[in-house]
């Protein structure tokens, strides 16, 4: 469905007075990056990502009926009240109200936690908005006279999550999700993410992602600001064309399981993302010196061993080390021996491809 009208709510029956719904959603790591948007959270180019498994946001949604109009909510993150989170969620509610009218009928206490550091280049907004969208949609599903099918649920959850964080559209399902119009992928569209259903070598369904925590602090420039700087970027049009071509180039690689070509393309995509940051006005740098040291060490290790291990980067300093499961032992020994010293407090997260949204 490529019309927002498809996601308007159907008839409600009896609505509960209060309750608790829990959902968890994973982060994801884009292989072909989305950087630049238009309208309300619509991407200027298609992107494709691995859904992660261990890096998740867990959200408990406590709801209680109220009689006044308007939004009413409170947010607790890692056990600490976070009033600073409320405006962003209220903006999210504003965007999705037409598609989820019960938002004004309840007070919501949102209790959430991550299994990974917040605001450090792992997509916490993606997992957070996906988990919240899942919980809110589950509440609506209990109210509908005719509940949604699982496929319709996932589709609307991705649509709603996108309105909170663009990349959250890719955190509802797995193992690989594409988001954004692309001429070679018929089901791909700008409104929501879809499971990549083109030919896929099984090696990619068990791929590993070890995330090296180079910097666990707040980013100097938020992703929202970074996306905004693409509007007048001198290289924006070329970048959007490049991303579309890279996705076309990636498709036969995913079908064949050519892991060295996969490594080459994924690394060039990561560097292209950061090149846009380096050349925007104003320019900004999210990589750290240790990020570059890790990149050089990975390339040296790959050249020496001929193992298909590569890096990618999100909008931050942390490095995602991607590799097939069958070389996991050797790569983890390499990480522990040579890359761990570049990590903040020696910390890294061992993750893998996952499957998406889960009810708690």
Image (cartoon, helix red, strand yellow):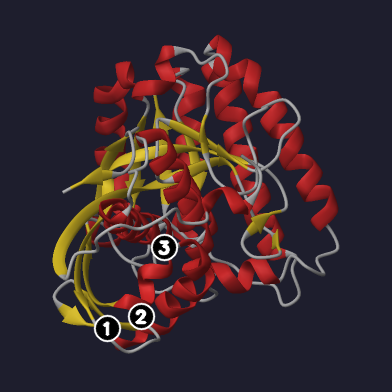
Rendering coords of residue 339 (x, y %): 34, 45
- Please name whichever residue, 134 or 250, is drawn nearer the observer in this view of the structure: 134
Residue under label 3 = 125
- Please name whichever residue, 284 or 156, is drawn nearer the observer in this view of the structure: 156
Rendering coords of residue 38 (x, y %): 72, 62
Rendering coords of residue 3 (x, y %): 65, 48
Query: What is the CA distance from the residue labelled 2 to the residue labelled 1?
Result: 6 Å
Closer to the chain start, of discs 3 and 2, is 2
Quarter-wise, where is residue 284 in the image? bottom right
- Please name whichever residue, 250 or 259, is drawn nearer the observer in this view of the structure: 250
Q: Residue at 51% of width from left, 16% of height from top?
A: 200
Q: Badge 1 local density, few (<14 within 10 Å), some, or many (20+)?
A: few
Q: Vertically, is 318 above or below 310?
A: below
- Please name whichever residue, 330 or 112, is drawn nearer the observer in this view of the structure: 112
Residue under label 1 = 82
Marks 2 and 1 in Cβ contact (< 8 Å)? yes
Residue under label 2 = 85
């Amino acid at each position: 469905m490529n019309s927002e009208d498809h996601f308007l709510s159907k008839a409600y029956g009896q609505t509960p007075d209060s309750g608790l719904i829990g959902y968890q959603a994973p982060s994801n790591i884009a292989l072909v990056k989305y950087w630049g948007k238009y309208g309300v959270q619509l991407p200027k180019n298609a992107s494709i990502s691995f859904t992660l498994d261990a890096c998740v946001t867990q959200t408990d949604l406590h709801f209680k009926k109220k009689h006044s109009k308007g939004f009413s909510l409170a947010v607790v993150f890692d056990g600490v009240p976070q009033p600073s989170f409320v405006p962003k969620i209220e903006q999210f509610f504003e965007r999705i109200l037409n598609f989820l009218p019960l938002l004004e009928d309840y007070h919501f206490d949102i209790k959430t936690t991550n299994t990974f550091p917040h605001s450090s280049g792992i997509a916490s907004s993606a997992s957070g908005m996906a988990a919240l969208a899942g919980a809110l949609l589950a509440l609506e599903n209990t109210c509908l006279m005719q509940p949604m099918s699982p496929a319709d649920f996932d589709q609307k959850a991705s649509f709603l999550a996108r309105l909170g964080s663009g990349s959250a559209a890719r955190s509802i399902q797995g193992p690989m999700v594409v988001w954004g119009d692309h001429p070679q992928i018929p089901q791909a569209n700008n409104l929501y993410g879809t499971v990549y259903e083109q030919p896929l070598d099984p090696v990619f369904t068990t791929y590993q992602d070890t995330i090296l925590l180079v910097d666990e602090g707040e980013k100097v420039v938020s992703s929202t600001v970074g996306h905004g700087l693409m509007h007048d970027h001198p290289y924006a049009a070329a970048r959007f064309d490049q991303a579309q071509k890279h996705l076309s180039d990636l498709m036969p690689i995913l079908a064949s399981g050519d892991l060295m070509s996969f490594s080459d393309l994924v690394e060039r995509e990561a560097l292209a993302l950061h090149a846009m940051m380096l050349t925007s006005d104003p320019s900004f740098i999210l990589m750290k010196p240790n990020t570059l040291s890790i990149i050089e060490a990975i390339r040296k290790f790959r050249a020496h061993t001929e193992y298909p291990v590569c890096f990618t980067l999100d909008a931050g300093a942390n490095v995602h080390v991607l590799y097939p499961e069958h070389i996991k032992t050797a790569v983890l020994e390499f990480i522990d021996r040579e890359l761990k010293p570049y990590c903040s407090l020696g910390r890294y997260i061992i993750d893998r491809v996952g499957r998406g949204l889960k009810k708690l």
